[in-house]
Amino acid sequence: MSAVLSPQELKVKKYSNEDIRSISKLREEFAKAMLRLLGIEVEPVGKGTLSEEVFEGFHESEDDRFDFKCEELGILFEVTGTSWTKRQSAERYDPDWEEEGRRKPSSKKAVLAVLKKKVDDAFAMGVQDRLYFVSVNDGQGEWRFMPCNLVRKYPFGRYASMEGEYYLIPWENWRTPGWMREKIEELRQKKSKR
């Protein structure tokens, strides 16, 4: 048996819209619980956050556009995620696959994606310095953070069908939970000095 997966073996199950909403809700629940473990109390504020319902319509402000808000510090969190492992992600974005499933040498890296529309909205609302993306990666068994104000330096492309363009951020560039804990302490210290 080959240690390298063929493109056919890499195909992930096609999920229904109901499945996707369930997975999104689970990722949001996980993110909320893990943020609490880091000492960050958040409240769901986004339309549809922690729900499997679909909410159509215009987002009026930062308080209904992004998933969670930490009132104490005035910061926001938007949950994203993937069921792909790092290896699957790298292979998905690697154009150097051969027909037989053997890989050519490649410099491609695994990526985690952020929906371009969310980043555009954050900049339009002026909250890019207060928004953090939380990537819950159930396929890899980890979670990471990315400050919104850093996202635009990465390229964008197609990632998920029917959802528009995404910024494709190398997996290793995402911040660890330890980084987020330190960032929160820094924000608390700044707030206490005011």
Image: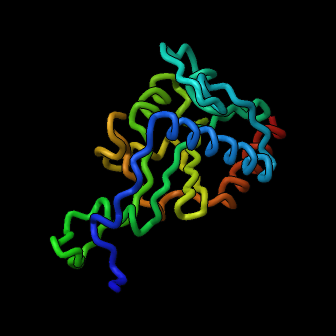
Q: Quadrant of residue 42?
A: top right
Measuring from the top left, give residue 19's x and y in whole percent.
52, 40
Which residue sits at x=40%, y=58%? 111
Which residue sits at x=58%, y=52%? 136
Measuring from the top left, give residue 96's x and y in whole percent.
19, 69
Front-most of residues 27 and 12: 12
Q: Quadrant of residue 46?
A: top right
Which residue sits at x=60%, y=56%? 143
Front-most of residues 12 and 105: 12
Q: Quadrant of residue 12?
A: bottom left
Measuring from the top left, give residue 69's x and y in whole percent.
69, 31
Q: Quadrant of the N terminus?
A: bottom left
Measuring from the top left, give residue 13's x and y in whole percent.
41, 53
Left or right placement of residue 10 versus residue 137 in this view: left
Q: Quadrant of the C terminus?
A: top right
Left or right placement of residue 170 versus residue 93 in this view: right
Front-most of residues 2 and 55: 2
